[in-house]
Image: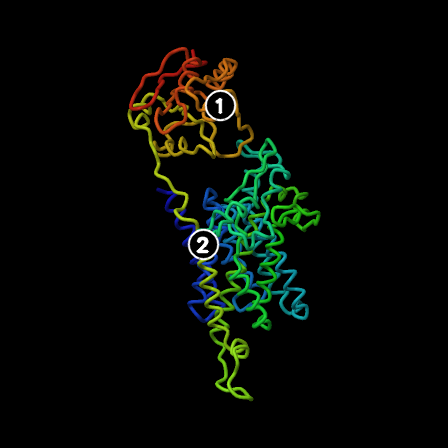
């Protein structure tokens, strides 16, 4: 229930935050609504919603954009108020995701450079206010950030070095063709979903490329791209529009990773992201996740274009008679822009139905069959809990965490993929009734049971792949058969390694 609530709020709050931020820059509520819709439900959000809730909880980037705009451009509020607010927002963001905060600060630094180059003559005037506000934000952030860093570096089960190698993450980058080729994340794929999905891939430990739809968020579609091109031509004197379009393009370049990819082909052209792969705290970044900021700036650009188009009015008569369609567009482009906006939103409709499923809880895990006999120890389930098999973690949460489970999705110093996991994995992957894991796994599995302090084993006999293979293996490890209770093979009072 908690996950479902936060998951729903992640989309709604991100869209709402962008909507209210855009009210600062637009006078037309429809334009702000469209911008919020594009940001909150863009392909990046739909893709990351497949499993990365910390990446779709994204209401803070638009708020930080508003605060940076106030600090660097507008400067109408008291500097200490804006600086303190920015520091507090960054504290919340580092609690949600340190990775996203690192990306925000990098994009903000690039934005400062772009703004300084465009407004060189205003640097001396704006610098004192900006310096004081940013310095205060850093002071507010410093102590909480130091605590987070201490936990990251020295806390229990902390990880030394990169979580993933640079080579493994090299395929998780946007393809230039991905801007116009939809993936499985879109409902209208025009038969190109397999091609678009293959553009972003993860390199497995066996060096096999596996398409990763969750990281594929670069699809913009031809209507939105055409809207941006025509909008920047028509309103090229709008400073905010020029800035966000440039930032959207730079964010896209960052999302492309170290090498330019075009239609699935890796070109020899090096991109700026290659620098990040050599920096200590940034080399594990996933390049494709910079699409979040590409969409942030696209949403702002679309809202500004629609708002400015609404305020433009064509003259009733030209010097030489009635205005032609070219002149009408030059003075009143709103109808065309609205058509492109509607087509763009339709092209971005998420694939439906979304990746949801009903949780299946084996009756044997319902109280008091197992929990009362486990004495706060560890429950072993089949399959082991991993990111591809998350049901054991769901069962654990339903039972109020009254027992521990081996493995899990967290990245820790010692993942311990031992003999038990190897045996269960072969049972799950082979899936034939006559198969049994090799006897060489038995001694290693007994060591696993001691390490994990296993007190009970539950193997559901339904909604599973070849559970009897796992039953035979655990029976060999424990030297006794299970009790069949409520559609599951159950061992209680397991005492491997205990006297």
- In this rendered view, identify the residue nearer to me: 362 or 329: 329
Local SS, label 2 = loop
In the rendered image, residue 95, in percent from the top left (x then y), is placed at: 49, 45
Local SS, label 1 = helix
- In this rendered view, identify the residue nearer to me: 343 or 469: 343
The span from disc 2 to disc 1 (Cα, nearest Å) is 39 Å
Residue at 62% across, 37% down: 165
- In this rendered view, identify the residue nearer to me: 378 or 486: 486
Which residue is identified by label 1? Answer: 426
- In this rendered view, identify the residue nearer to me: 277 or 267: 267
Q: Is residue 337 above or below residue 136?
A: below
- How many labels sit on residues? 2
- Few, some or many residues within 10 Å of mark 1 (<14, 14–19, 20+): some
In the rendered image, residue 330, in percent from the top left (x then y), is placed at: 54, 77
Please identify the quadrant where the C terminus is shown: top left
Sequence-first disc among 2 and 1: 2
Q: Is residue 272 above or below residue 78?
A: above
Looking at this view, name the residue that lies furthest to the front.
191
In the rendered image, residue 45, in percent from the top left (x then y), is placed at: 47, 50
In the rendered image, residue 109, in percent from the top left (x then y), is placed at: 62, 56
**Quarter assignment of residue 244:** bottom right
- Few, some or many residues within 10 Å of mark 2 (<14, 14–19, 20+): many
Residue at 68% across, 43% down: 278
Proximity of marks 2 and 1: CB atoms separated by less than 8 Å: no
Q: Is residue 117 above or below residue 309?
A: above
Task: Please tell me whether mark 2 or mark 1 is closer to you in this view.
Answer: 1
Position of 34 with respect to 365 (left or right) is: right
Position of 62 with respect to 173 (left or right) is: left
- Per the rendering, the mark at residue 301 is none
- Per the rendering, the mark at residue 41 is 2
């Amino acid at each position: 229930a908690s996950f479902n609530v936060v998951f729903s709020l992640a989309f709604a709050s991100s869209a709402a935050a962008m909507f209210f931020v855009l009210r600062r820059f637009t006078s037309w509520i429809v334009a702000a609504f469209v911008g919020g819709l594009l940001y909150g439900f863009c392909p990046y959000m739909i893709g990351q919603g497949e499993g990365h809730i910390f990446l779709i909880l994204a209401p803070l980037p638009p708020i930080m954009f508003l605060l940076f705009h106030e600090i660097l451009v507008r400067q109408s509020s008291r500097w200490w108020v804006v600086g303190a607010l920015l520091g507090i927002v960054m504290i919340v963001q580092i609690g949600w995701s340190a990775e996203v905060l690192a990306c925000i600060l990098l994009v903000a630094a690039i934005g400062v450079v772009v703004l300084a180059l465009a407004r060189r003559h205003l640097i001396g005037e704006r610098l004192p206010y900006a310096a004081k506000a940013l310095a205060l934000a850093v002071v507010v952030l410093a102590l909480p950030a130091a605590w987070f860093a201490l936990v990251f570096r020295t806390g229990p089960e902390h990880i030394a070095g990169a979580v993933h190698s640079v080579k493994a993450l090299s395929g998780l980058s946007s393809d230039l063709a991905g801007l116009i080729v939809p993936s499985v994340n879109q409902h209208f794929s025009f038969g190109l979903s397999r091609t678009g999905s293959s553009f972003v891939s993860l390199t497995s430990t066996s060096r096999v490329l596996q398409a990763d739809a969750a990281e594929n968020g670069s699809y913009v579609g031809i209507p939105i791209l055409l809207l941006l091109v025509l909008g920047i031509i028509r309103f090229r004197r709008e400073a905010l529009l020029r800035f966000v379009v440039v930032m959207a393009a730079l964010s896209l370049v960052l999302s492309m990773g170290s090498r330019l990819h075009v239609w699935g082909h890796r070109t020899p052209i090096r991109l700026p992201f290659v620098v990040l792969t050599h920096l200590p705290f940034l080399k594990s970044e996933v390049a494709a996740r910079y699409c979040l900021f590409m969409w942030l700036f696209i949403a702002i650009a679309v809202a500004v274009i629609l708002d400015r188009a609404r305020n433009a009015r064509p003259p009733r008569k030209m010097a030489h008679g009635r205005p032609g369609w070219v002149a009408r567009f030059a003075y009143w482009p709103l109808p065309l822009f609205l058509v492109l906006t509607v087509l763009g939103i339709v092209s971005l409709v998420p694939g439906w139905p979304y990746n949801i499923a009903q949780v299946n809880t084996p009756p044997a895990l319902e109280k008091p069959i197992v929990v009362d006999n486990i004495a706060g120890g560890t429950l072993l389930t089949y399959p082991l809990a991993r990111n591809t098999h998350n049901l054991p973690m769901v069962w654990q949460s339903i039972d109020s965490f009254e027992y521990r489970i081996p493995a899990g999705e967290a990245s820790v110093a010692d993942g311990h993929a031992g003999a038990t996991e190897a045996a269960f994995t072969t049972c799950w992957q082979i899936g034939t009734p006559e198969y049994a894991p090799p006897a060489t796994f038995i001694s290693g599995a007994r060591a696993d049971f001691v390490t994990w302090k296993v007190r009970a084993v539950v193997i559901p006999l339904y909604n599973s792949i070849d559970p009897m293979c796992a039953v035979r293996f655990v029976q060999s490890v424990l030297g006794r058969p299970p009790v069949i209770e409520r559609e599951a093979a159950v061992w209680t009072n397991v005492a491997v390694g205990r006297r």
